[in-house]
Image (cartoon, helix red, strand yellow):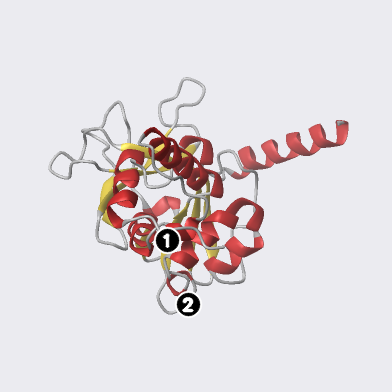
Amino acid sequence: MKKFLYIAVVLITTLTSCKKYYFDTGIHDPKYIGTTLQYLQEKKPLFDTTLTVIKLAEMESVLSNPNDPYTFFAPMSGSIRNAIYRLNRSLETSGKDTVSQLSQIDKSVWRNNLSLYIFKGANLLKDYPQRDTISFQAFPGQGYNSYSNRVMNIGVIFNDAGGVTYAGYRQLFLAYIPDLSNPQVALANAPVATSDIQTNTGVIHVLRKNKHNFGFNTTRFIDEVIAAGIKPPTP
């Protein structure tokens, strides 16, 4: 226990002194020798369900091409399981069979929703503009086209420290815009837990699983799944 506490203190000191903008998943080597897909595979306990969704969406090549880099706001497996849990509760309420296998959900649904997390180019936290939820008019972040050309809001929250405005740690946010005609209203926010993991094929920003359900708007995700049709489970 003492050894664990010592390591924790060292990590916190290192994070503070180096001014790295990592929020709650610990320090990491920002340079990874391998593709984005390989990184996720290496961290499979966190991304096992995510990897299944990438495969079902047939988007493995998007995260593996060194000649065409992408930034991936990676949802952890827990956020996908949260969405499936909500889906199944909705199906139960309607008297319908629940989903027991991810492959029962149509490929188009997985591809459409996974695309919301992928953006052209390799962008680090420092490349995104400031966002302030209290002074949103002054610091609104910025709209970026996702892989599916859906406009998403991305911005960096500058936290306060020691009574000094914007002097604290910086946290990256990806947000779904429900109404594109009102891009600053009712955004569905997904905070980043660990940022700036640089791979041979782009950049990974890992989202916090306990603050995010896959697809951003679970009601919309459920409607998409039902509209596309649910396949029977395979034996």
Query: What residue do we see at 34% from left, 51% from top?
Result: 225
- Quarter of the image that includes the C terminus: bottom right
* Tally of marks: 2
Q: Considering only vertical position in the picture, is 174 above or below 108?
A: above
Few, some or many residues within 10 Å of mark 1 (<14, 14–19, 20+): many
The x and y percentages for residue 146 are 30, 58
* Residue 14 appears in view: yes
The picture places residue 163, in percent across and down from the top left corner, at: 47, 20
Q: Can residue 31 be seen here?
A: no
The amino acid beneath tag 1 is Thr
Element type at mark 2: loop
**Is residue 6 shown left or right of residue 48?**
right
Horizontal side of residue 151 vs 90, given as left or right: left
Please identify the residue farthest to the left as the structure is shown: 181
Q: Which corner quadrant holds the N terminus?
A: top right
Figure quadrant of residue 136? top left
Instruction: Judge by depth and name the residue closer to the eye, 28 or 206.
Output: 206
**Residue drawn 37% across the image and 38% down it:** 189
Query: Is there a contact, CB below 8 Å, between mark 2 and mark 1?
Result: no
Image location (x, y in percent) of residue 48? 60, 56
Q: Is residue 84 left or right of residue 215?
A: right
Q: Quadrant of residue 199?
A: bottom right
Local packing at callout 2 (Cα closer than 10 Å; few below 14, some 14-19, many 20+) is: some
Which sits in the foreground, 159 or 64? 64
The residue furthest right is 2
Circle 1 residue: 71
Res 66 label: 2
Marks 2 and 1 sit apart, C-alpha to C-alpha, by 12 Å
Within the image, what quadrant is residue 37 found in?
A: bottom right
Q: The disc labelled 2 sits on which kind of residue?
A: Pro
